[in-house]
């Protein structure tokens, strides 16, 4: 390394909601990044962005026309500064149909694993809803808000057991088949070329027998983010709220090469660098993986060793190896 490059420091501007900034920008990340020549600089979205530089890269999770205009203006004045990620590409993740469409379009083949998404349909209005059979679904199903914009409402889900439960819903929503998956999911964090998978608690399986005694619907929200979930990752053999054993320690991870290839395909197809996706392993076929959710700029600080992973990613971007970043 030349003397000049040893001295070179990079400035990465970050524009995040206060809560998000506090969770991501921990002293440990600032230290790790600084050791490798990166200064992380907060951006004030209220002030003109073009007056806050210079930046070598911008990372953001803010929305709205004013912010998009700020980014466009900054880009036109600084065409070589990467903006992670493009608002248009992020937009695709704000709709639960378009976020998964990309998965169904991936042309990837694996020797052992199969992947896909659960069957789902959009219900736009209740009056056009006839029966579950007409929708080519069977109970139980999950009603999810069509919009996934980070609001509390967008995380409000309903597990529906019968037609009475279904009739109680308010359109529009996405109706997705409930797939038994052993009560756990995998969250696959992607930061450019870096891919890290963690296990999380999920809804318990519903047997045909159990379904007979379940009536109506059950609301739930942020199930994989419940407070005791982190404990589950570390503790063995605890019971979940339904009384079923969920021993996350003994759950076998999908192969890293499968996840890396899937993540690469999704990253390129989405044109995004910072996201995670939730994956279920089908209880009927352990080689079948279903992607159920894709989230922009998730809670990376929950990921063990996130400081090194994020710093590696920043360096990749600065060296122009990220999607949407041109040479
Ligand atoms: N088709 C399905 N079959 C079985 N369980 C599911 C299915 N879809 C979702 N779940 C369960 O519901 C949880 C919430 O669903 P989903 O991930 O779509 O919502 P979200 O609010 O966008 O989540 P996040 O907090 O990750 O953004 C999942 O983590 C999983 O535990
Ligand atoms: O608030 P919105 O825009 O919906 O985004 C959330 C995602 O939906 C969640 O997936 C993130 O949690 P995970 O990192 O556990 O997936 C969650 O992480 P956070 O709660 O740590 O910020 C958010 O990124
Ligand atoms: Mg999810
Ligand atoms: Mg989500």
Image (cartoon, grey):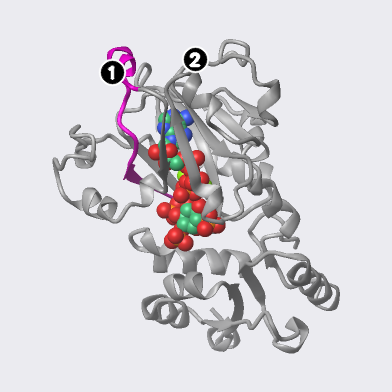
Q: Does mark 1 have its CB less than 8 Å from ligand 1?
A: no
197 part of magenta stretch: yes
Residue found at x 63% / y 11%: 134
Residue linked to disc 1 = 210
Where is the C terminus found, in terms of image quarters? Answer: bottom right
**Is residue 161 toward the left or the right of residue 68 in the image?**
left
Q: Can you give x and y, in whole percent of width and height, for residue 141 in the image?
A: 48, 25
Q: Residues within 10 Å of mark 1 (few under 14, many from 20)?
A: few
Instruction: Tell me where the magenta segment starts and ends, as one range.
Output: 194-214
Q: Can you give x and y, in whole percent of width and height, for residue 37 in the image?
A: 51, 82
Mark 1 secondary-structure assignment:
helix
Q: Is residue 16 above or below residue 39?
A: above
Dividing the picture into quarters, in which one does residue 11 lie?
bottom right
Looking at the image, the residue that sits furthest to the right is: 76
Q: Which mark is residue 138?
A: 2
**Is residue 56 toward the left or the right of residue 244 in the image?**
right
Q: How many marks?
A: 2
Q: Does mark 2 have its CB less than 8 Å from ligand 1?
A: no
């Amino acid at each position: 390394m030349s003397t000049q490059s040893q001295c070179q420091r990079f400035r990465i501007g970050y524009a995040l909601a206060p809560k998000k900034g506090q969770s991501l920008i921990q002293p440990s990340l600032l230290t790790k990044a600084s050791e490798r020549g990166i200064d992380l600089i907060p951006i004030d979205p209220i002030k003109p962005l073009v007056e806050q530089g210079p930046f070598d890269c911008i990372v953001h999770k803010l929305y709205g026309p004013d912010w998009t205009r700020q980014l466009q203006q900054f880009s036109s004045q600084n065409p070589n500064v990467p903006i992670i990620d493009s608002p248009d590409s992020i937009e695709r993740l704000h709709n639960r149909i378009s976020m998964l469409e990309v998965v169904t379009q991936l042309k990837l083949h694996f020797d052992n694993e199969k992947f896909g998404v659960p069957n789902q349909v959009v219900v736009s209005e209740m009056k056009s809803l006839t029966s579950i059979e007409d929708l080519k679904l069977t109970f139980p199903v999950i009603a999810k808000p069509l919009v996934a914009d980070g609001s509390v409402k967008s995380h409000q889900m309903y597990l529906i057991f019968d037609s009475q439960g279904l009739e109680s819903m308010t359109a529009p929503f996405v109706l997705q088949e409930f797939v038994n998956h052993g009560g756990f999911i995998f969250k696959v964090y992607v930061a450019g070329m870096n891919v890290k998978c963690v296990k999380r608690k999920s809804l318990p399986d519903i047997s045909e027998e159990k379904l007979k005694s379940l009536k109506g619907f059950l609301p739930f929200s942020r199930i994989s983010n419940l407070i005791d979930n982190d404990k589950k990752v570390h503790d063995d053999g605890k019971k979940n709220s339904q009384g079923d054993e969920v021993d996350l320690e003994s759950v076998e991870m999908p192969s890293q090469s499968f996840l890396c290839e899937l993540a690469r395909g999704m990253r390129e197809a989405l044109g995004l660098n910072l996201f995670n996706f939730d994956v279920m392993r089908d209880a009927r076929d352990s080689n079948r993986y279903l992607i159920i959710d894709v989230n922009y700029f998730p809670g990376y600080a929950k990921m063990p060793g996130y400081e090194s992973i994020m710093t590696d990613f920043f360096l990749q971007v600065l060296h122009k190896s990220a999607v949407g970043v041109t040479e």
